[in-house]
Image (cartoon, coloured by chain):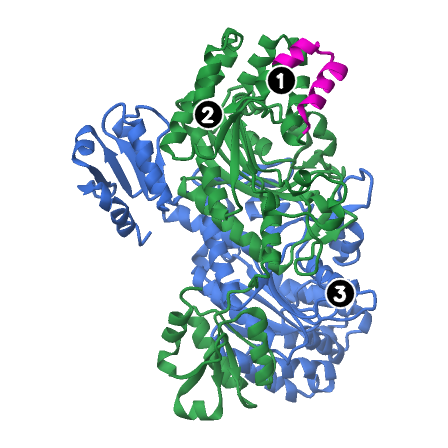
Chain colours: A blue, B green
Amino acid sequence: QFVLQNNTFLKQIFHSHSGTRDYNPKQMAIRERVFNTIISCFKRHGAETIDTPVFELKETLTGKYGEDSKLIYDLKDQGGELLSLRYDLTVPFARYLAMNKITNIKRYHIAKVYRRDNPAMTRGRYREFYQCDFDIAGQYDGMIPDAECLKIVHEILSELDLGDFRIKVNDRRILDGMFAVCGVPDDKFRSICSTVDKLDKVSMPWEDVKKEMVNEKGLSEEVADRIGEYVSLQGGMDLAERLLQDHRMSQSKQACAGLSDIKLLFSYLQLFQVTDKVVFDLSLARGLDYYTGIIYEAVLTQAGAVPAPAEAQKGAPAEESVSVGSVAGGGRYDGLVGMFDPKGRKVPCVGVSIGIERIFSIMEHKAEVSAEKVRTTEVQVMVASAQKNLLEEKLRLITELWDAGIKAEVMYKKNPKLLSQLQHCEESGIPLVAILGEQELKDGVVKLRVVATREEVDISRADLIAEIRKRTSEA
Amino acid sequence: QFVLQNNTFLKQIFHSHSGTRDYNPKQMAIRERVFNTIISCFKRHGAETIDTPVFELKETLTGKYGEDSKLIYDLKDQGGELLSLRYDLTVPFARYLAMNKITNIKRYHIAKVYRRDNPAMTRGRYREFYQCDFDIAGQYDGMIPDAECLKIVHEILSELDLGDFRIKVNDRRILDGMFAVCGVPDDKFRSICSTVDKLDKVSMPWEDVKKEMVNEKGLSEEVADRIGEYVSLQGGMDLAERLLQDHRMSQSKQACAGLSDIKLLFSYLQLFQVTDKVVFDLSLARGLDYYTGIIYEAVLTQAGAVPAPAEAQKGAPAEESVSVGSVAGGGRYDGLVGMFDPKGRKVPCVGVSIGIERIFSIMEHKAEVSAEKVRTTEVQVMVASAQKNLLEEKLRLITELWDAGIKAEVMYKKNPKLLSQLQHCEESGIPLVAILGEQELKDGVVKLRVVATREEVDISRADLIAEIRKRTSEA
């Protein structure tokens, strides 16, 4: 499990009462960087964005999340319809498409969702958290949008530089077909599927998964062993080809449809040059009921990414304490929109959700351990004074700078000490100081000081704006 | 009152059940432009940003909003503490400062707030809406941060190009001092203040305001007339100077403190070069209880900004149907943070809230009447094919483009018609098409088509990315 260090640099301001937290300026600066990378990628792929309200009619959410429905936050009945806070962004998206009769769209949506989960601060889980979804809706030729979703995951994880990763791919039809040909009774598919999910989700060893299948779910040892053979398989297009020839698998039309699509998917992934990270993994099951085709999940594989604090490591296996788990996941859900259409008209969809909260935590942790100075403002220059009674002159100068688009600050004091002005720059990472003094005013210049090097040069007022732009253009 | 036109181009998707709405991609594109302008301004002035949860403990909100408390949305009691959706961003900000013992910060916060108001779609009012706040907290020399807030309003309204505007300024202490010297009993200050507020807020004529004061609030005619003389006054620094000499006003220490600060404020506003739009207006009262000093409000003055639809104009005075009301407001609130501190430690604050929803509506309306084509994506180039069976070649090319950071799209069809590919570009405003054909592939070139002019040029594969960048660099 992922463990977040508790320290003062990026202290989580945790409201124990509600399982929520405030984000301080340092966290917001990191969050903005992550969002910018992700949104740039979505826009590069031509996505639009939409927004939906934070609450939906209670009935919109009913029956969509299975057992997890108990985690939905309801609003108090203060008259009017019963409302609930959104639980994810996928159901509101499907409701939006059906309500507006939209049959094709490529959209992203970044917003907060709400779950009455048992908040576990140390595992980075909150009752209020961001989701970051990209989905392609429409009737298109097979696997092209699906492959683009994986390309997007590959681009985002590469750009965020989180360390090495793998994208596991499977297909609901392959899982169902496999269960059928192994001899699992139809009514046990979902239940067995959720047991298989534990191989991946909580790294349960096969022996324990098998025990659960036999002892709790009532499968015979033989059936369980057959499943065990399949779910240990990993590969690429070659594995899909082999399984299409497999004497048992080939008997399931469903499985064959899934396997052919995996083959087609890999052919597109080759063109997208992302097969290095993608693996066809028959143990990937993913919990949500609404998936109908391909499913996928990205995991970070670099063990060192986020070391656990010393206390947590005691007694815990090293592998577990350093694993960071899933950072993206998704799949195809061709039936969900139809549930909101009065005539049941279907709109095929495929999408991916970036595990943004986990990524924030990793980025915050990286900033901590590298002792990186995270800037919380973008101020380019501080307008300062070397003597007293220069407030008016400073306000005149900063007006020129603001009006020219320069990001600038001045202290809200009539007569601040030069030292305290310089200290403020050091603390907040402001690279330049424009210092006014009696002599400079007489000479029509400004003393421009580079905070990092303490170098000072006199710049004429006419050249100041260009000089500040030049010296801060990389920033 | 501001009236929003109902039409198909930017149709408001209104959920009558909950008084909320979805934002479609066109609305989101406009919203993003507005946010970018505002956030750039906040950053230019050195602001950090924070975020707080959508719900607060119910008790945090209790007793902060007076009568309006009945509009607070409560969550259902599902165990645990009682929670409410935030009603504004100011109270959570004050709670955040007190909780984290922060004594100075300059921050902006853009987020949704919730009010169980009677939703009135035609007046652009919703139960879920954005607030967009900038605040400066800290013990500083008088009126410097206050003046910066007005500078910020001036910059934002100028850059958004919404038409001419005025920023009205007053001070709570001047109002209270005025009431005292006019003979209003102490216990009627708030009540009379809210009557004065109607002069500005709902453009009630003085005669009606006077009637309310005399008949409903029990003032004598004489006292009301004295107030009437003052609240008709408008001016600048000169008016503040005159009132400091006024035989009645000069008797109130409070009023004099407020008037001196108005003078100081105007001296800074002169340096900031924004006095052209700022007017000292003694009728400005603003409703909220927590203001302790300067208050201000920006209004658009251009009558033509948003014409009302024909139905609404019938029987309504022309001035009323075209007024767009307040687009920004704020003031100084030095006591609020202390309400959340166990020891009552005060943190002086001054801030401004941009009326972002009203601005969205105006921008949407402008886009409608100008028939401006609002692009909802930023795609620079569409990768298209002139013949069949070129999907693989297209995917190979678009991979190169994406990996070079070019925003590009391809149709999710194996063999789309060239015409339908070109039509998609016209509809979504994509400026360039990179067309692949058998001949182009043989020649190692791509046919680059400019959608607007239909001009086509062959570009070698090696030069394509540079050529696309060059041709879309203005966009």
Q: Which chain carries label 2?
A: B
Q: Which chain carries label 3?
A: A
Q: In this view, does B320 lie to the left or right of B257?
A: right
**Above or below for A158 versus B231:** below
Q: Specify the quadrant that holds the N terminus of chain B.
A: top right
Residue B70 visible? The answer is yes
In this rendering, do the residues under marks 1 and 3 share a single chain?
no
| Closer-to-camera residue (B472/B440) | B472
Q: Specify the quadrant that holds the C terminus of chain B.
A: bottom left
Q: How far apart are marks 1 and 3 (CA)?
A: 77 Å
Q: Which residue in the protein does label 3 denote?
A: A191
Q: Does the magenta stretch include residue B214?
A: yes
| Closer-to-camera residue (A330/B219) | B219
Q: Which residue in the protein does label 1 denote?
A: B228
Kind of element beneath mark 1:
helix
Tag of residue A49: none
Check if mark 2's residue and mark 1's residue have beta carbons within 8 Å.
no
Residue A12 visible? The answer is no
Q: Which residue in the protein does label 2 denote?
A: B236
Residue A37 percent across, percent down from the top left: 47, 59
Q: Which of the two discs, 1 and 3, sits closer to the camera?
A: 1
**Above or below for A89 versus B3:** below
Closer to the N terminus: mark 2 or mark 1? 1
Residue A155 percent across, percent down from the top left: 48, 67
Q: Name the kind of residue labelled 2 in the image.
A: Gly
In the rendered image, which quarter is residue B448 located in?
bottom left
Q: Name the kind of residue labelled 1 in the image.
A: Gly
In the rendered image, which quarter is residue A195 located in?
bottom right
